[in-house]
Structures are given as C-alpha cells and as structure tokens.
Image (cartoon, rainbow, N blue to C red):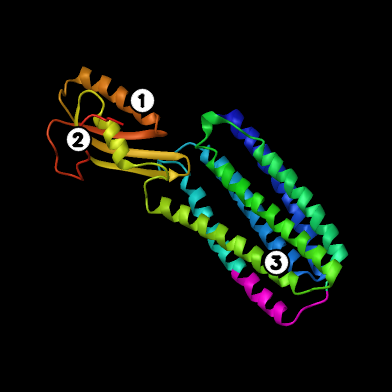
Amino acid sequence: MPIHETNILGRRFLISIGITLAILLAEVTGGLWTGSLALLSDAAHVFMDVFALTLSYAALRLSSMPPDDRYTYGFHRLEVLAALINGITLGAIAVGIFSEAWARWQDPQPIKSLELLIIATIGLCANLIVVFVLGGHKHEEHEREDLNLRSAFLHVLGDVIASLGVILAAIIIWRTNWTWVDPLVSALIGLIILISSWRVLKSSLHIFLEGVPEGMSVNDIAKAINGIEGVIEVHDLHVWSLCSGHVALSAHVITDDNSMGKNASLMKDLKSGLRSYGIEHTTIQFECVPCGQGRVRPVGKNTD
C-alpha cells in the first residue's frame, strides 16, 4: 500500500481510537453509576474495539516496515497473532458477561434507567461517528489490503448494534421497571461478542495453518496456469496467506520449451495471470519432466 494512503488510514485509526476511548470511559463510569450490567457489557465490547483498532493500527504500521535478514517476509504475521489474541480475549469476556448476567437474572439490581438512556444515546452517537470515519475510506485498487480496515469497521459496527440494545433496555426499564431486561440484553451483547470471537479465531487460525485464502480455489488457479500457452503441467502448487491481503504462491511448471528466452516470456504471462487472482508473491520453478513432488493439478486449457 502506498505510503500516502497508509498515512491517511493511520490518521483515521487514531481518530477512531480517541473517540472509542472516550466512549469506553463514559460507559464504564455510567455503568457503575446507574448499576446497569448491559452498559458495562457494552463497555467490555467497546474495550475490545479499542484493542482491535489499536492492533489494526499497529499492523498497518508494522506491515509497512521492510523485510530484513532475520524476518525475510517482514512483520505481516504479527497482525495474525494479534487477531488470535483478540479472538481469545473476546471469548473470555463473553463468558464473563454470561456469568454475571445469570447472577443478575437471579438477583435483579436497581437501575437508573433515565441516566442509562442518556449515556447509551451519547455512546451510540459517538459509535456512529467512528463508523463514518472508518467507513469513509473507499479504494477499489487496494480492496484486499483493506481487509484489516474492514475487520476493525465490523468491530465498531457490532458495538453500534450493542448500543441500540442498551438504549432499548433503558427505555423498557424506564417505562415498565422490568429490571430483568438488563441482564437479558447483556446476554445478547455477550452473544454478539462470542460470534465475533469465533470469526476472528477462525480467520486467524486458517492463516496460521497456511490454508488457501477465502474465495480462492487451487483447482481454478491450476486451470488458469494450465491455460497459458507453453504450460504442459503444473504440480506441487501451494497458495497461502502471509497475513490478510498478502497472498503467496509456489508451483512447479512443466513447459514445452526450456529455452531461456521462452521461459522469460512465459514467466511474465504467468505472473500477469496470477495478479488477476490478487497473488503478487510467486515462486515458480520450470521443469522439463515431472520431479515427482506434490500433487499434479488439472491438465488442459482453461475453458471457464
């Protein structure tokens, strides 16, 4: 990603982190003051938003650092490690919310509903500002690189939903004095956090296990390679993610002509074709006969 665009994204993250920190302080103070578990649960969600935004900002900065002799791929995988920690922490917070919600369900506590409504409404407005700040960045050319931004955006969008739940609970308690609505909304917020935890863990573990990136098919890529003139067969084909938005490929390609000039032209065609799949980092080995390594992929011209 260009340095100019990285700086713009960095400023958006810093603004969002500042606003979200203010929301966190307001909701923790307000939750303790009003006695609302729903507001404290939402504050826990906001804390994870701060954590996620900070990690995303750090990943953005670290990913721009050049590789060195010790870390030849650079520091992209720190983003994945951070996401894994983020997912585990989200799950732990959700379990804690469920436990406290069950205790409050059995022993309801008095709640200052009007004050809760005011604080939750302010929190919702601030969250909507953050959504606008993060969602305001659109850049088609770097759609894959913006996965990091979109994950942070979805975190905050989930908090908007949680804030709406707190406001609904505050209105119901204010009008009916049904305090059991507070732990019920808390449990729903905990469920939202748990779902977020699962999604983050699933994505980060998939990258750690060097799985094929979501939305890609190794067979389709193999057919595309086989469809290029001069390719006889492709085998030992691997496609994986270094981190979100950074896809790597390695393959052995058997050609009908191993002359230096022919292979240079063929390599250019292969790299150009793979870029259409969003694959920039490639390691391709040309062979005259199969070396016996890896699985042979579908042979023949691509008819898709």
Residue type of the residue flagged with mark 3: Val
Is residue 105 a member of the stretch shown in magenta?
A: yes
Give the crowd class for mark 2: few <14, some 14-19, many >=20 residues within 10 Å: some
Write the start and end of the magenta stretch as one range: 95-110
User: For mark 2, what is the residue?
Assistant: 299
Residue type of the residue flagged with mark 2: Val
Is residue 26 a member of the stretch shown in magenta?
A: no
Which of these two is toward me, 107 or 41? 107
**Is the residue 122 above or below the residue 172 in the image?**
above
Residue at the far front: name it: 176
Q: Main secondary structure of the magenta part?
A: helix
What residue is at 83 percent from the left and 76 percent from the top?
110
What residue is at 76 percent from the left and 52 percent from the top?
124
Q: Closer to the N terminus: mark 1 or mark 3?
A: 3
Taking the image as drawn, is residue 201 in sight?
yes
The circle on residue 185 is: 3
Give the crowd class for mark 3: few <14, some 14-19, many >=20 residues within 10 Å: many
Q: Do the residues labelled 1 and 3 touch (CB within 8 Å)?
A: no
Q: Which of marks 1 and 3 is in front?
A: 3
Residue 252 screen position, x and y as percent: 22, 36
Apparent side of residue 222 relative to residue 34 in the rendered image (left or right): left
Would you identify the image quadrant in which residue 135 lies?
top right
Residue type of the residue flagged with mark 1: Ser
Tell me the SS state at disc 3. helix
Residue 273 screen position, x and y as percent: 34, 27
Tell me the SS state at disc 1. helix
**Is the residue 198 above or below the residue 277 in the image?**
below
Q: Closer to the N terminus: mark 1 or mark 2?
A: 1
The circle on residue 272 is: 1
